Image: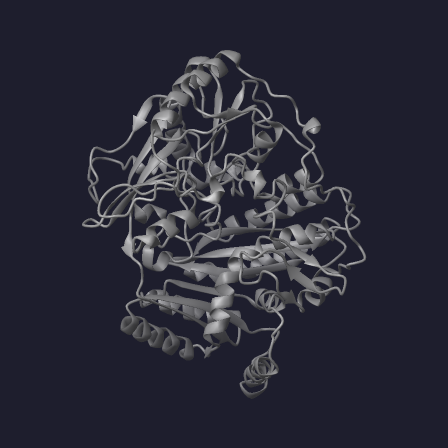
Amino acid sequence: CGRQPGSIVGVHVHCYPNLCPYLFFFHRQEIMKWNGWGYSDSRFFFNKKGQAEFTGRRYRLSGLIIPGLKDWFESTFGASLQHKTPATVSPILNSSAVQPPTLNEAFVEELKSTGIPLSHDAEDRVFRAHGHCLHEIFALREGKFGRVPDMVVWPNCHNDVVKIVELACKHNVCLIPYGGGTSVSSALECPPEETRSIVSLDTSQMNRILWIDEKNLTAHVEAGIVGQDLERLLNESGYCTGHEPDSMEFSSLGGWVATRASGMKKNVYGNIEDLVVHVKMVTPQGVIEKSCQGPRMSTGPDVHHFIMGSEGTLGVVTEVTMKIRPMPEYQKYGSVVFPNFEQGVACLREVARQRCAPASIRLMDNEQFKFGHALKPQVSSIFTSFLDGLKKFYITKFKGFDPNRLCVATLLFEGDREKVLQHEKQVYDIAAKFGGLAAGEDNGQRGYMLTFVIAYLRDLGMDYYVIGESFETSVPWDRVLDICRNVKARIIRECKDKGVQFSPLSTCRVTQTYDAGACVYFYFAFNYRGLSDPVHVYEQVEHAAREEILANGGSLSHHHGVGKLRKEWMRDTISKVGMGMLKSVKDYVDPNNIFGNRNLL
Protein backbone atom coordinates (compact mmCIF):
# COMPACT_ATOMS: atom_id res chain seq x y z
CA CYS A 1 0.00 0.00 0.00
CA GLY A 2 3.10 2.15 0.12
CA ARG A 3 2.43 4.46 3.09
CA GLN A 4 4.03 4.74 6.47
CA PRO A 5 1.93 4.25 9.62
CA GLY A 6 0.40 7.30 11.25
CA SER A 7 0.92 9.67 8.34
CA ILE A 8 -1.21 12.35 6.72
CA VAL A 9 -1.10 12.87 2.97
CA GLY A 10 -3.36 15.21 1.04
CA VAL A 11 -4.74 18.69 0.91
CA HIS A 12 -2.88 21.60 2.52
CA VAL A 13 -1.32 19.60 5.33
CA HIS A 14 2.09 18.46 6.39
CA CYS A 15 3.21 14.89 5.73
CA TYR A 16 4.56 12.80 8.60
CA PRO A 17 6.26 9.91 6.78
CA ASN A 18 8.16 8.45 9.75
CA LEU A 19 5.59 8.81 12.51
CA CYS A 20 4.64 5.43 13.97
CA PRO A 21 2.27 5.68 16.96
CA TYR A 22 3.41 3.19 19.56
CA LEU A 23 -0.08 1.76 19.92
CA PHE A 24 0.35 0.21 16.50
CA PHE A 25 3.04 -2.35 17.09
CA PHE A 26 1.87 -5.72 15.80
CA HIS A 27 2.27 -7.11 19.32
CA ARG A 28 0.10 -4.73 21.32
CA GLN A 29 0.54 -6.91 24.40
CA GLU A 30 4.07 -5.48 24.70
CA ILE A 31 2.62 -2.22 26.02
CA MET A 32 -0.91 -3.22 27.07
CA LYS A 33 -2.28 -5.72 29.56
CA TRP A 34 -3.53 -8.95 28.05
CA ASN A 35 -5.70 -9.70 31.09
CA GLY A 36 -6.83 -6.28 32.29
CA TRP A 37 -7.53 -2.71 31.22
CA GLY A 38 -5.09 -0.37 29.57
CA TYR A 39 -1.34 0.12 29.62
CA SER A 40 0.88 -2.40 31.38
CA ASP A 41 2.69 0.34 33.30
CA SER A 42 -0.51 1.92 34.67
CA ARG A 43 -2.41 0.41 37.58
CA PHE A 44 -3.80 1.13 41.03
CA PHE A 45 -2.29 -0.61 44.05
CA PHE A 46 -2.19 -0.23 47.83
CA ASN A 47 1.31 0.45 49.16
CA LYS A 48 2.78 -0.88 52.42
CA LYS A 49 1.18 1.99 54.34
CA GLY A 50 -2.23 1.04 52.96
CA GLN A 51 -2.39 4.12 50.76
CA ALA A 52 -3.56 3.84 47.17
CA GLU A 53 -1.19 4.84 44.37
CA PHE A 54 -1.48 4.93 40.61
CA THR A 55 1.62 3.88 38.70
CA GLY A 56 3.15 5.07 35.45
CA ARG A 57 3.51 8.55 33.99
CA ARG A 58 0.68 8.71 31.47
CA TYR A 59 -2.12 10.33 33.48
CA ARG A 60 -2.55 13.30 35.79
CA LEU A 61 -3.12 10.83 38.64
CA SER A 62 0.07 8.88 37.84
CA GLY A 63 2.63 8.77 40.64
CA LEU A 64 0.28 10.37 43.16
CA ILE A 65 -0.96 9.15 46.55
CA ILE A 66 -4.75 8.82 46.86
CA PRO A 67 -5.30 8.88 50.63
CA GLY A 68 -9.08 8.48 50.69
CA LEU A 69 -9.45 5.42 48.46
CA LYS A 70 -8.64 2.75 51.07
CA ASP A 71 -11.30 3.92 53.57
CA TRP A 72 -13.91 4.33 50.83
CA PHE A 73 -13.08 0.91 49.37
CA GLU A 74 -13.25 -0.92 52.69
CA SER A 75 -16.37 0.84 53.98
CA THR A 76 -18.27 0.60 50.68
CA PHE A 77 -17.65 -3.08 50.00
CA GLY A 78 -16.88 -4.54 53.41
CA ALA A 79 -13.52 -5.42 51.90
CA SER A 80 -10.19 -5.60 53.68
CA LEU A 81 -6.64 -5.26 52.45
CA GLN A 82 -5.98 -8.40 54.50
CA HIS A 83 -8.30 -10.39 52.23
CA LYS A 84 -6.52 -10.59 48.93
CA THR A 85 -7.59 -12.96 46.18
CA PRO A 86 -5.30 -15.93 45.51
CA ALA A 87 -2.35 -14.92 43.35
CA THR A 88 -3.49 -16.58 40.14
CA VAL A 89 -2.93 -13.48 38.02
CA SER A 90 0.28 -13.64 36.01
CA PRO A 91 1.71 -10.86 33.85
CA ILE A 92 2.90 -13.58 31.48
CA LEU A 93 0.47 -15.66 29.44
CA ASN A 94 0.89 -19.43 29.73
CA SER A 95 0.92 -20.39 26.04
CA SER A 96 0.62 -24.10 26.80
CA ALA A 97 -2.89 -23.51 28.22
CA VAL A 98 -4.11 -22.16 24.86
CA GLN A 99 -5.64 -24.60 22.40
CA PRO A 100 -3.42 -25.13 19.32
CA PRO A 101 -4.70 -23.36 16.21
CA THR A 102 -6.96 -25.00 13.66
CA LEU A 103 -5.47 -23.70 10.43
CA ASN A 104 -6.93 -23.80 6.93
CA GLU A 105 -3.64 -24.59 5.18
CA ALA A 106 -4.82 -23.60 1.69
CA PHE A 107 -5.96 -20.22 3.00
CA VAL A 108 -2.66 -19.72 4.86
CA GLU A 109 -0.55 -20.55 1.81
CA GLU A 110 -2.43 -18.18 -0.47
CA LEU A 111 -2.38 -15.45 2.17
CA LYS A 112 1.39 -15.81 2.58
CA SER A 113 1.81 -15.18 -1.14
CA THR A 114 0.19 -11.73 -0.73
CA GLY A 115 2.83 -10.60 1.78
CA ILE A 116 0.19 -9.59 4.36
CA PRO A 117 1.61 -10.16 7.88
CA LEU A 118 0.07 -13.02 9.87
CA SER A 119 0.64 -14.91 13.11
CA HIS A 120 -0.65 -17.95 14.94
CA ASP A 121 1.36 -17.19 18.09
CA ALA A 122 -0.66 -17.91 21.25
CA GLU A 123 -0.18 -14.42 22.74
CA ASP A 124 -1.32 -12.69 19.55
CA ARG A 125 -4.39 -14.92 19.37
CA VAL A 126 -5.46 -14.61 23.02
CA PHE A 127 -5.04 -10.82 23.01
CA ARG A 128 -7.64 -10.56 20.22
CA ALA A 129 -10.02 -13.19 21.63
CA HIS A 130 -11.78 -10.89 24.07
CA GLY A 131 -13.14 -7.47 24.93
CA HIS A 132 -13.57 -6.12 28.44
CA CYS A 133 -16.72 -7.70 29.85
CA LEU A 134 -16.30 -8.85 33.43
CA HIS A 135 -16.57 -12.56 32.58
CA GLU A 136 -13.90 -12.22 29.90
CA ILE A 137 -11.33 -10.53 32.15
CA PHE A 138 -12.14 -12.73 35.16
CA ALA A 139 -11.45 -15.87 33.09
CA LEU A 140 -8.19 -14.46 31.74
CA ARG A 141 -6.98 -13.61 35.24
CA GLU A 142 -7.58 -17.23 36.20
CA GLY A 143 -5.69 -18.45 33.12
CA LYS A 144 -8.79 -19.94 31.50
CA PHE A 145 -9.04 -19.72 27.72
CA GLY A 146 -12.02 -20.78 25.64
CA ARG A 147 -12.16 -20.68 21.86
CA VAL A 148 -9.65 -18.15 20.54
CA PRO A 149 -8.84 -17.08 16.97
CA ASP A 150 -6.63 -19.54 15.13
CA MET A 151 -4.70 -16.81 13.37
CA VAL A 152 -4.25 -13.04 13.27
CA VAL A 153 -3.75 -11.00 10.08
CA TRP A 154 -2.68 -7.36 9.80
CA PRO A 155 -3.85 -5.68 6.59
CA ASN A 156 -2.04 -2.44 5.79
CA CYS A 157 -4.73 -0.82 3.63
CA HIS A 158 -8.14 -1.23 2.01
CA ASN A 159 -6.78 -3.41 -0.83
CA ASP A 160 -5.23 -5.83 1.67
CA VAL A 161 -8.65 -6.26 3.28
CA VAL A 162 -10.20 -6.98 -0.13
CA LYS A 163 -7.63 -9.76 -0.66
CA ILE A 164 -8.20 -11.26 2.79
CA VAL A 165 -11.99 -11.29 2.41
CA GLU A 166 -11.77 -12.82 -1.08
CA LEU A 167 -9.50 -15.61 0.21
CA ALA A 168 -11.75 -16.19 3.25
CA CYS A 169 -14.73 -16.62 0.92
CA LYS A 170 -12.76 -18.95 -1.37
CA HIS A 171 -11.63 -21.21 1.51
CA ASN A 172 -14.64 -20.79 3.85
CA VAL A 173 -12.72 -19.20 6.71
CA CYS A 174 -14.47 -17.24 9.49
CA LEU A 175 -13.33 -13.61 9.91
CA ILE A 176 -13.74 -11.51 13.05
CA PRO A 177 -12.72 -7.83 12.64
CA TYR A 178 -10.67 -6.41 15.52
CA GLY A 179 -10.20 -2.68 16.12
CA GLY A 180 -9.22 -1.44 19.58
CA GLY A 181 -10.51 -4.39 21.61
CA THR A 182 -12.55 -2.24 24.03
CA SER A 183 -15.90 -3.98 23.44
CA VAL A 184 -18.11 -4.55 26.50
CA SER A 185 -20.78 -6.64 24.75
CA SER A 186 -18.98 -9.99 24.18
CA ALA A 187 -18.69 -8.93 20.53
CA LEU A 188 -15.12 -10.23 20.13
CA GLU A 189 -15.64 -13.63 21.71
CA CYS A 190 -15.24 -16.51 19.29
CA PRO A 191 -18.41 -18.61 19.03
CA PRO A 192 -17.49 -21.93 20.71
CA GLU A 193 -19.57 -23.85 18.18
CA GLU A 194 -17.61 -22.49 15.20
CA THR A 195 -15.76 -25.39 13.53
CA ARG A 196 -14.07 -23.42 10.76
CA SER A 197 -10.71 -21.76 11.15
CA ILE A 198 -11.25 -18.35 12.79
CA VAL A 199 -9.06 -15.43 11.68
CA SER A 200 -8.85 -12.18 13.65
CA LEU A 201 -8.53 -9.31 11.17
CA ASP A 202 -6.60 -6.67 13.10
CA THR A 203 -6.99 -3.22 11.51
CA SER A 204 -4.32 -1.49 13.64
CA GLN A 205 -1.87 -1.00 10.74
CA MET A 206 -4.54 0.94 8.82
CA ASN A 207 -3.94 4.06 10.88
CA ARG A 208 -3.37 6.93 8.48
CA ILE A 209 -5.19 10.12 7.68
CA LEU A 210 -5.26 9.87 3.87
CA TRP A 211 -6.26 13.48 3.23
CA ILE A 212 -7.68 16.59 4.81
CA ASP A 213 -9.97 18.85 2.79
CA GLU A 214 -9.74 22.26 4.38
CA LYS A 215 -12.41 23.81 2.17
CA ASN A 216 -15.09 21.28 3.06
CA LEU A 217 -13.70 20.57 6.56
CA THR A 218 -13.53 16.83 6.09
CA ALA A 219 -10.82 14.22 6.61
CA HIS A 220 -10.53 10.82 4.95
CA VAL A 221 -9.13 8.35 7.47
CA GLU A 222 -8.29 4.66 7.62
CA ALA A 223 -10.54 2.84 10.07
CA GLY A 224 -7.87 1.25 12.25
CA ILE A 225 -6.65 4.51 13.77
CA VAL A 226 -7.42 4.87 17.49
CA GLY A 227 -9.05 7.97 18.91
CA GLN A 228 -6.09 9.51 20.71
CA ASP A 229 -3.90 9.26 17.59
CA LEU A 230 -6.62 10.59 15.29
CA GLU A 231 -7.06 13.66 17.47
CA ARG A 232 -3.32 14.17 17.94
CA LEU A 233 -2.60 14.06 14.19
CA LEU A 234 -5.51 16.35 13.39
CA ASN A 235 -4.47 18.74 16.17
CA GLU A 236 -1.04 19.07 14.59
CA SER A 237 -2.81 20.52 11.54
CA GLY A 238 -5.12 22.70 13.64
CA TYR A 239 -8.23 20.49 13.51
CA CYS A 240 -10.22 18.02 15.60
CA THR A 241 -13.22 15.70 15.29
CA GLY A 242 -14.33 16.33 18.87
CA HIS A 243 -15.38 12.68 19.17
CA GLU A 244 -14.18 11.56 22.60
CA PRO A 245 -15.70 8.34 23.92
CA ASP A 246 -14.45 7.22 27.33
CA SER A 247 -12.38 4.59 25.52
CA MET A 248 -10.78 7.00 23.03
CA GLU A 249 -7.24 6.06 24.10
CA PHE A 250 -7.70 2.57 22.68
CA SER A 251 -10.92 2.32 20.61
CA SER A 252 -10.73 2.66 16.83
CA LEU A 253 -12.60 4.71 14.26
CA GLY A 254 -13.88 1.52 12.62
CA GLY A 255 -15.14 0.31 15.99
CA TRP A 256 -16.98 3.60 16.53
CA VAL A 257 -18.76 3.18 13.20
CA ALA A 258 -19.49 -0.51 13.78
CA THR A 259 -21.11 0.16 17.19
CA ARG A 260 -22.76 3.57 16.59
CA ALA A 261 -20.52 5.18 19.20
CA SER A 262 -21.11 8.35 21.20
CA GLY A 263 -18.56 10.73 22.72
CA MET A 264 -18.36 12.89 25.83
CA LYS A 265 -18.57 16.09 23.74
CA LYS A 266 -21.42 15.06 21.49
CA ASN A 267 -23.44 18.18 22.42
CA VAL A 268 -21.16 20.26 20.19
CA TYR A 269 -19.69 17.74 17.77
CA GLY A 270 -22.41 15.09 17.50
CA ASN A 271 -22.43 11.31 17.76
CA ILE A 272 -20.60 9.18 15.21
CA GLU A 273 -23.64 9.12 12.88
CA ASP A 274 -23.54 12.93 12.82
CA LEU A 275 -19.82 13.00 11.98
CA VAL A 276 -19.65 10.40 9.21
CA VAL A 277 -19.84 11.71 5.63
CA HIS A 278 -18.69 8.63 3.73
CA VAL A 279 -17.85 5.00 4.61
CA LYS A 280 -16.09 2.27 2.67
CA MET A 281 -16.71 -1.32 3.77
CA VAL A 282 -15.46 -4.61 2.33
CA THR A 283 -18.08 -7.39 2.35
CA PRO A 284 -18.18 -10.92 0.88
CA GLN A 285 -20.29 -9.47 -1.96
CA GLY A 286 -17.78 -6.70 -2.68
CA VAL A 287 -17.14 -3.12 -1.57
CA ILE A 288 -20.03 -0.93 -0.44
CA GLU A 289 -19.73 2.88 -0.58
CA LYS A 290 -21.65 5.88 -1.86
CA SER A 291 -20.74 7.54 -5.16
CA CYS A 292 -20.02 11.00 -3.73
CA GLN A 293 -19.02 12.87 -0.58
CA GLY A 294 -22.17 15.01 -0.42
CA PRO A 295 -23.39 16.01 3.04
CA ARG A 296 -26.83 14.47 2.55
CA MET A 297 -28.62 12.30 0.00
CA SER A 298 -32.24 11.33 -0.64
CA THR A 299 -31.64 8.03 -2.38
CA GLY A 300 -33.75 5.55 -0.45
CA PRO A 301 -32.77 4.21 2.98
CA ASP A 302 -29.30 5.38 3.92
CA VAL A 303 -26.84 2.50 3.35
CA HIS A 304 -24.59 4.02 6.00
CA HIS A 305 -27.19 2.94 8.52
CA PHE A 306 -26.75 -0.68 7.47
CA ILE A 307 -23.04 -0.29 8.16
CA MET A 308 -23.20 1.74 11.39
CA GLY A 309 -24.12 -0.62 14.19
CA SER A 310 -23.44 -3.77 12.13
CA GLU A 311 -20.85 -4.90 14.73
CA GLY A 312 -18.63 -6.85 12.35
CA THR A 313 -21.43 -9.07 11.01
CA LEU A 314 -21.43 -7.77 7.42
CA GLY A 315 -17.84 -6.83 6.64
CA VAL A 316 -14.87 -4.65 7.54
CA VAL A 317 -15.00 -0.85 7.61
CA THR A 318 -11.74 0.25 5.96
CA GLU A 319 -11.99 4.02 5.32
CA VAL A 320 -14.18 6.81 6.68
CA THR A 321 -14.64 10.45 5.68
CA MET A 322 -15.44 12.50 8.78
CA LYS A 323 -16.40 16.07 9.51
CA ILE A 324 -13.64 18.03 11.23
CA ARG A 325 -13.52 21.45 12.86
CA PRO A 326 -10.80 23.96 13.68
CA MET A 327 -9.51 23.33 17.19
CA PRO A 328 -11.48 25.38 19.71
CA GLU A 329 -9.88 28.69 20.61
CA TYR A 330 -10.86 28.40 24.25
CA GLN A 331 -11.71 25.61 26.68
CA LYS A 332 -13.07 25.99 30.18
CA TYR A 333 -14.11 23.44 32.78
CA GLY A 334 -16.69 23.93 35.49
CA SER A 335 -18.83 22.16 38.06
CA VAL A 336 -22.08 22.68 39.90
CA VAL A 337 -23.20 21.13 43.17
CA PHE A 338 -26.95 20.51 43.67
CA PRO A 339 -28.85 19.79 46.89
CA ASN A 340 -30.06 16.49 45.45
CA PHE A 341 -30.17 14.38 42.29
CA GLU A 342 -33.75 15.39 41.45
CA GLN A 343 -32.84 19.06 41.15
CA GLY A 344 -29.73 18.18 39.19
CA VAL A 345 -31.78 16.24 36.64
CA ALA A 346 -34.30 19.10 36.43
CA CYS A 347 -31.43 21.48 35.64
CA LEU A 348 -30.07 19.22 32.88
CA ARG A 349 -33.58 18.95 31.46
CA GLU A 350 -33.90 22.74 31.31
CA VAL A 351 -30.46 23.13 29.74
CA ALA A 352 -31.48 20.63 27.06
CA ARG A 353 -34.84 22.36 26.55
CA GLN A 354 -33.10 25.69 25.98
CA ARG A 355 -30.55 23.93 23.72
CA CYS A 356 -27.65 25.52 25.49
CA ALA A 357 -25.76 22.42 26.68
CA PRO A 358 -21.97 22.84 26.87
CA ALA A 359 -19.69 20.39 25.04
CA SER A 360 -20.03 18.05 28.01
CA ILE A 361 -22.42 18.11 30.96
CA ARG A 362 -22.53 15.08 33.24
CA LEU A 363 -24.44 14.64 36.47
CA MET A 364 -23.30 12.11 39.06
CA ASP A 365 -25.46 10.88 41.91
CA ASN A 366 -24.41 11.06 45.56
CA GLU A 367 -22.74 7.65 45.65
CA GLN A 368 -20.67 8.53 42.60
CA PHE A 369 -19.81 11.92 44.06
CA LYS A 370 -18.38 10.17 47.14
CA PHE A 371 -16.50 7.77 44.89
CA GLY A 372 -15.00 10.66 42.94
CA HIS A 373 -14.05 12.39 46.18
CA ALA A 374 -12.26 9.21 47.34
CA LEU A 375 -10.09 9.43 44.22
CA LYS A 376 -8.84 12.90 45.08
CA PRO A 377 -5.02 12.92 45.24
CA GLN A 378 -3.10 14.08 48.29
CA VAL A 379 -2.83 17.87 48.39
CA SER A 380 0.67 19.27 48.63
CA SER A 381 -0.14 22.50 50.44
CA ILE A 382 -1.84 23.33 53.74
CA PHE A 383 -3.48 26.32 52.03
CA THR A 384 -5.12 24.08 49.38
CA SER A 385 -6.32 21.73 52.11
CA PHE A 386 -7.72 24.72 54.05
CA LEU A 387 -9.57 25.99 50.95
CA ASP A 388 -11.07 22.53 50.34
CA GLY A 389 -12.31 22.45 53.94
CA LEU A 390 -13.74 25.94 53.57
CA LYS A 391 -15.67 24.97 50.43
CA LYS A 392 -17.05 21.88 52.17
CA PHE A 393 -18.11 23.96 55.19
CA TYR A 394 -19.79 26.57 52.94
CA ILE A 395 -21.78 23.97 51.00
CA THR A 396 -22.81 21.67 53.86
CA LYS A 397 -23.13 24.02 56.84
CA PHE A 398 -23.77 27.50 55.48
CA LYS A 399 -25.92 26.42 52.50
CA GLY A 400 -27.39 23.42 54.30
CA PHE A 401 -26.66 20.77 51.66
CA ASP A 402 -26.89 17.23 53.03
CA PRO A 403 -23.57 15.48 52.23
CA ASN A 404 -25.50 12.22 51.82
CA ARG A 405 -27.85 13.69 49.20
CA LEU A 406 -25.95 16.33 47.25
CA CYS A 407 -24.78 15.61 43.71
CA VAL A 408 -22.41 17.26 41.26
CA ALA A 409 -22.45 18.08 37.55
CA THR A 410 -19.17 18.49 35.67
CA LEU A 411 -19.05 20.87 32.70
CA LEU A 412 -16.80 21.50 29.72
CA PHE A 413 -17.22 24.55 27.48
CA GLU A 414 -15.41 24.91 24.14
CA GLY A 415 -15.31 27.51 21.39
CA ASP A 416 -14.73 31.22 20.88
CA ARG A 417 -13.66 32.77 24.22
CA GLU A 418 -16.34 35.46 24.35
CA LYS A 419 -19.09 33.01 23.41
CA VAL A 420 -17.83 30.46 25.95
CA LEU A 421 -18.04 33.02 28.75
CA GLN A 422 -21.57 34.02 27.68
CA HIS A 423 -22.54 30.35 27.44
CA GLU A 424 -21.07 29.64 30.86
CA LYS A 425 -23.12 32.43 32.46
CA GLN A 426 -26.30 31.12 30.81
CA VAL A 427 -25.76 27.58 32.16
CA TYR A 428 -24.84 28.74 35.67
CA ASP A 429 -27.90 31.02 35.74
CA ILE A 430 -30.11 28.04 34.90
CA ALA A 431 -28.35 25.91 37.54
CA ALA A 432 -29.00 28.59 40.19
CA LYS A 433 -32.75 28.33 39.55
CA PHE A 434 -32.51 24.67 40.63
CA GLY A 435 -30.45 25.36 43.74
CA GLY A 436 -27.10 24.76 42.05
CA LEU A 437 -23.90 26.35 43.32
CA ALA A 438 -20.79 26.82 41.20
CA ALA A 439 -18.15 24.40 42.54
CA GLY A 440 -15.08 25.44 40.58
CA GLU A 441 -13.04 24.65 37.51
CA ASP A 442 -10.72 22.19 39.27
CA ASN A 443 -13.56 19.81 40.18
CA GLY A 444 -14.84 19.93 36.62
CA GLN A 445 -11.47 19.21 35.08
CA ARG A 446 -10.67 16.47 37.57
CA GLY A 447 -14.02 14.79 36.97
CA TYR A 448 -13.49 14.88 33.22
CA MET A 449 -9.96 13.46 33.42
CA LEU A 450 -10.93 10.74 35.92
CA THR A 451 -12.95 9.22 33.10
CA PHE A 452 -9.77 7.75 31.69
CA VAL A 453 -8.49 6.13 34.89
CA ILE A 454 -11.71 4.78 36.42
CA ALA A 455 -11.56 1.71 34.17
CA TYR A 456 -8.29 0.70 35.86
CA LEU A 457 -10.08 0.38 39.22
CA ARG A 458 -11.82 -2.86 38.28
CA ASP A 459 -8.47 -4.67 38.19
CA LEU A 460 -7.69 -3.36 41.69
CA GLY A 461 -11.09 -4.51 42.94
CA MET A 462 -10.56 -8.02 41.63
CA ASP A 463 -7.36 -8.23 43.69
CA TYR A 464 -9.57 -7.94 46.80
CA TYR A 465 -12.70 -10.01 45.95
CA VAL A 466 -14.63 -7.09 44.43
CA ILE A 467 -16.13 -7.35 40.94
CA GLY A 468 -18.00 -4.66 39.05
CA GLU A 469 -19.13 -3.34 35.71
CA SER A 470 -20.86 -0.42 34.03
CA PHE A 471 -23.70 -0.41 31.51
CA GLU A 472 -25.80 2.28 29.88
CA THR A 473 -29.16 3.13 28.36
CA SER A 474 -31.05 6.03 26.83
CA VAL A 475 -34.41 7.10 28.20
CA PRO A 476 -37.04 9.86 27.74
CA TRP A 477 -36.75 12.78 30.15
CA ASP A 478 -39.95 11.91 32.03
CA ARG A 479 -38.50 8.49 32.91
CA VAL A 480 -34.97 9.50 33.98
CA LEU A 481 -35.62 9.68 37.73
CA ASP A 482 -37.73 6.51 37.75
CA ILE A 483 -35.16 4.48 35.84
CA CYS A 484 -32.29 5.67 38.05
CA ARG A 485 -34.16 4.90 41.25
CA ASN A 486 -35.67 1.58 40.15
CA VAL A 487 -32.56 0.09 38.53
CA LYS A 488 -30.33 0.93 41.49
CA ALA A 489 -32.90 -0.56 43.87
CA ARG A 490 -33.24 -3.68 41.69
CA ILE A 491 -29.46 -4.24 41.76
CA ILE A 492 -29.41 -4.05 45.57
CA ARG A 493 -32.39 -6.39 45.85
CA GLU A 494 -30.99 -8.93 43.39
CA CYS A 495 -27.60 -9.01 45.11
CA LYS A 496 -29.29 -9.80 48.42
CA ASP A 497 -31.50 -12.47 46.84
CA LYS A 498 -28.52 -14.11 45.11
CA GLY A 499 -26.58 -14.49 48.35
CA VAL A 500 -24.17 -11.58 48.14
CA GLN A 501 -23.14 -11.13 51.77
CA PHE A 502 -22.07 -7.48 51.57
CA SER A 503 -23.96 -4.38 50.47
CA PRO A 504 -23.22 -3.62 46.79
CA LEU A 505 -22.28 -0.31 45.24
CA SER A 506 -25.17 0.77 43.00
CA THR A 507 -24.76 4.17 41.39
CA CYS A 508 -25.52 6.16 38.25
CA ARG A 509 -24.80 9.31 36.29
CA VAL A 510 -26.49 11.16 33.44
CA THR A 511 -23.82 11.51 30.75
CA GLN A 512 -25.41 12.87 27.57
CA THR A 513 -28.49 14.99 27.00
CA TYR A 514 -30.87 15.30 24.04
CA ASP A 515 -34.03 17.22 23.22
CA ALA A 516 -36.17 14.21 24.09
CA GLY A 517 -34.12 12.35 26.69
CA ALA A 518 -30.76 11.42 28.13
CA CYS A 519 -28.15 8.71 28.39
CA VAL A 520 -27.80 7.16 31.84
CA TYR A 521 -24.77 5.13 32.96
CA PHE A 522 -25.07 2.64 35.81
CA TYR A 523 -22.17 1.26 37.83
CA PHE A 524 -22.43 -1.63 40.23
CA ALA A 525 -19.94 -3.70 42.15
CA PHE A 526 -19.93 -6.07 45.09
CA ASN A 527 -17.67 -8.07 47.38
CA TYR A 528 -17.97 -11.70 46.29
CA ARG A 529 -16.33 -13.41 49.27
CA GLY A 530 -18.38 -16.48 50.16
CA LEU A 531 -19.77 -17.01 46.64
CA SER A 532 -18.79 -20.18 44.80
CA ASP A 533 -19.49 -18.75 41.31
CA PRO A 534 -19.29 -14.95 41.53
CA VAL A 535 -19.35 -14.35 37.77
CA HIS A 536 -22.60 -16.27 37.42
CA VAL A 537 -24.15 -14.22 40.24
CA TYR A 538 -22.91 -11.01 38.63
CA GLU A 539 -24.42 -12.01 35.27
CA GLN A 540 -27.77 -12.79 36.91
CA VAL A 541 -27.80 -9.37 38.58
CA GLU A 542 -26.82 -7.57 35.37
CA HIS A 543 -29.51 -9.47 33.45
CA ALA A 544 -32.12 -8.41 36.00
CA ALA A 545 -30.89 -4.81 35.81
CA ARG A 546 -31.26 -4.82 32.01
CA GLU A 547 -34.80 -6.21 32.37
CA GLU A 548 -35.55 -3.37 34.80
CA ILE A 549 -34.16 -0.81 32.35
CA LEU A 550 -36.40 -2.10 29.57
CA ALA A 551 -39.43 -2.26 31.87
CA ASN A 552 -38.86 1.41 32.77
CA GLY A 553 -38.82 2.61 29.17
CA GLY A 554 -35.05 2.54 28.61
CA SER A 555 -33.26 1.39 25.46
CA LEU A 556 -31.25 -1.80 25.08
CA SER A 557 -28.11 0.29 24.57
CA HIS A 558 -27.23 3.94 23.94
CA HIS A 559 -23.72 3.35 22.55
CA HIS A 560 -22.11 0.13 23.82
CA GLY A 561 -23.90 -1.96 21.22
CA VAL A 562 -25.52 -5.39 21.40
CA GLY A 563 -22.86 -7.98 20.62
CA LYS A 564 -23.75 -11.40 21.97
CA LEU A 565 -24.38 -10.15 25.51
CA ARG A 566 -27.69 -8.37 24.80
CA LYS A 567 -28.96 -9.98 21.62
CA GLU A 568 -31.69 -11.99 23.40
CA TRP A 569 -33.65 -8.71 23.65
CA MET A 570 -33.16 -7.61 20.03
CA ARG A 571 -36.46 -8.94 18.71
CA ASP A 572 -38.46 -7.13 21.39
CA THR A 573 -36.35 -4.00 20.81
CA ILE A 574 -36.73 -3.62 17.03
CA SER A 575 -39.73 -5.96 16.37
CA LYS A 576 -40.01 -9.27 14.52
CA VAL A 577 -40.19 -7.45 11.17
CA GLY A 578 -37.14 -5.38 12.06
CA MET A 579 -35.17 -8.54 12.84
CA GLY A 580 -36.30 -10.01 9.54
CA MET A 581 -34.96 -6.96 7.70
CA LEU A 582 -31.56 -7.28 9.39
CA LYS A 583 -31.41 -10.98 8.61
CA SER A 584 -32.27 -10.35 4.98
CA VAL A 585 -29.37 -7.91 4.67
CA LYS A 586 -27.04 -10.43 6.34
CA ASP A 587 -28.20 -13.25 4.04
CA TYR A 588 -27.57 -11.17 0.92
CA VAL A 589 -24.27 -9.55 1.91
CA ASP A 590 -22.76 -12.60 3.64
CA PRO A 591 -24.65 -15.76 2.61
CA ASN A 592 -21.93 -18.10 3.91
CA ASN A 593 -21.51 -16.30 7.22
CA ILE A 594 -17.85 -15.47 6.61
CA PHE A 595 -18.21 -12.70 9.19
CA GLY A 596 -19.36 -15.22 11.74
CA ASN A 597 -18.98 -13.52 15.12
CA ARG A 598 -22.73 -14.09 15.68
CA ASN A 599 -23.36 -10.63 17.09
CA LEU A 600 -26.80 -8.96 16.93
CA LEU A 601 -28.77 -11.75 15.24
Q: Residue 543 in the image: x percent, y percent?
A: 60, 44
Query: Relative to 442, is 59 above or below?
Result: above
- The quarter of the image holding the N terminus is top left
8 and 206: which is toward the camera: 8
Query: Relative to 495, is 395 above or below?
Result: below
Q: Is residue 210 left or right of residue 568?
A: left
Q: Confirm whether residue 555 shows in the render.
A: yes
Image quadrant where residue 151 sits = top right
Q: Is residue 321 left or right of residue 188?
A: left
Residue visible at 74% across and 57% down?
A: 502
Q: Confirm whether residue 241 shows in the render.
A: no
Residue visible at 75% across and 61% down?
A: 78
Residue visible at 44% across and 44% down?
A: 21
Q: Is residue 267 left or right of residue 549?
A: left
Q: Residue 241 in the image: x percent, y percent?
A: 33, 52
Query: Relative to 519, is 258 above or below?
Result: above
Q: Residue 407 in the image: x percent, y percent?
A: 53, 71
Residue at the limit of the structure toward the front, as seen here: 18
256 and 516: which is toward the camera: 256
Q: Residue 7 in the image: x percent, y percent?
A: 35, 42
Residue at the limit of the structure toward the bottom, as seen here: 398
